[in-house]
Amino acid sequence: MARLLESLGALKKAIASRGWFRDVRLVYQGFGPLGAWMFRELLPVSHIVAEYYGEEVQTYLEEEDGATVFSAEKESGVRHNDSTLFNRYYYPDRGEAIAASLNRLSGRVCFVPFATTPGLEEFLFRHGSRYHLLQNSTIVQNYFDYKARLAWSAKEIGIPIPPDSLVTLFGALDYPRLADAFESGFVIQVPLSQAGGGTHFAFSPDDFGRIVEENRAALGPLFDKTQVKVTPFLPGPSLNCTGCVVNGAVALSPPDIQIVGDPHFVETPGQYIGSDFARNDFEPEHRRRILEITARIGAWMGARGYRGNFGVDFLSTVDGNNRVKDIFVSEVNARLVGESQYMADWQAMAGSVPLTFFHLAEWMNLDEITPAEIAAYNASLPPIEGSALLLYTREKGTFRAAGGISSGIYRFDGDRLVRLRDGFLLSQTRSADEFVITNGIPWDGLVLGHPRYGDYNVFLCYLLTRESIVQPGNWRLVNDRWRRRADLVYAALGLVPCPPRLLPGEKA
């Protein structure tokens, strides 16, 4: 049985011979449809419910793979920054059509959402027991996502959090006292958020005033009594590790470097813009420590009812040579995480079992996956060859992409972007000179940004490469090579302004 997890090939043979997923009809829900590919090495994906769309979704998921895709963006022709609209209204609006399509399937219809939403839970409740949820409920997710909880429990778990961290109320924040306590600046985190949306950096009275004003407007009468976590600003890079609670153990991924808030790409300091697995330059002690902490957190979560994949974000300090010195836990993401979407492909490139398999194993009660086998898997994690860089619009407005860029395998000839062939995965490249433009590339007719008000930092696409993308001397920033390449791709997208217009049903 130890050979079961030795390689992806061995696992695929076991899946086929034992029929683990034979009658499963998988439904993936997430922001981007291509996230479904994290399970595609293991079983077909029947249906996808997503916010975004893209030319590559039609080409590779719908036409080639035969998946049925329900997409809010496809139907509205608009991509904007407010995902709460999709989470809240898509199932009430489109649930009957989704159910009608699913009811034509035989077998067990199993939903694996990136993160469970109240809309999905209501849909599942109203459509009976034939649909199965292979993910934690929103109540369980929110329990662990709550930013203050990890700070409260850090001593119990035995994990380091940033020194002098405090949990208080928004209404009790006092800038002079915080500025005295945190001379290099501080970070305020609201209880529940994703992709850096609830993380605010304060380096001046003006920063603090803006944070208070924005959150007072958003929270209204709840502002004064909303709990927040305040930590010192730490100058080191953001790090990450993904884990999976499975059968009484915790499976782990290799750690990676997260790029957050690089001002060359985004205006928001906490905005996630990419991950670098290719650097593979952690000190052995730091790598061991990250894996150990992730396992501790996973065991703590599992003992309190959590199941499946989760992510841990880390903060760090640096020494005089700008190398990572001390590592601290920032937060837990109780769901599938951004890295999951492409890490499965990169693990498959190395012949390794994707971590997403363990999520399925836990929720489908595959008892053959034992703690001893998981320990052996964790002890032999191979290095991963891959980095991802996300591109966003760089000014507020409403745009369309007129450049005619499509998903595919590309390379650069000097400053000239050369499309080599079709493709949408890093595993489809043949050398480090090739890279991929993929995942949500604006399609003909798509409006980027709220048609009436416009938006900042609207997501455009992913660039996937086998190379490291961080600066060797400063892992917080993208290196000059990939800044230049990102700029060239951004220019090739050919963004042009769109005139303001109303959304369907909206009044002037």
Image (cartoon, helix red, strand yellow):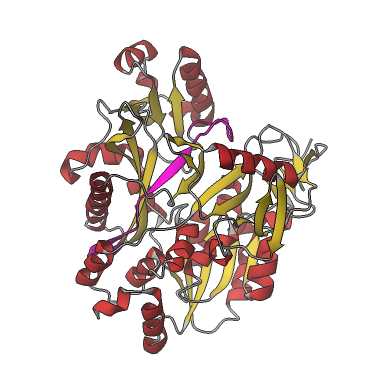
Establish if 428 lies above or below 456. Answer: below
In the image, taking residue 431 as reference, residue 337 lies left or right, namely left
Q: Position of residue 464 (x, y in %)?
A: 56, 54
| Observer-nearest of 205 and 216 | 205
What residue do we see at 44% from left, 53% from top?
337
Q: Place residue 228 in its image quadrant.
A: top left
Q: Residue furthest front?
A: 414
Q: Place residue 165 in its image quadrant.
A: top left
| Observer-nearest of 157 and 423 | 423
The quadrant of the picture occupied by the N terminus is: bottom left
Q: Position of residue 382 (x, y in %)?
A: 34, 62
Establish if 41 lies above or below 298. Answer: below
In the image, taking residue 165 as reference, residue 196 lies left or right, namely right
Establish if 391 lies above or below 189. Answer: below
What residue do we see at 49% from left, 19% from top?
207
Q: Which residues are magenta?
A: 245-269
Q: Position of residue 241 (x, y in %)?
A: 35, 50
Q: Position of residue 204 (x, y in %)?
A: 46, 15
Can residue 125 be seen in the rendering of this structure?
no
The quadrant of the picture occupied by the C terminus is: top right
Q: Is residue 496 magenta?
A: no
Can residue 179 be seen in the rendering of this structure?
yes
In the image, taking residue 305 as reference, residue 405 lies left or right, namely right
Q: Is residue 260 magenta?
A: yes
In the image, taking residue 49 as reference, residue 231 lies left or right, namely left
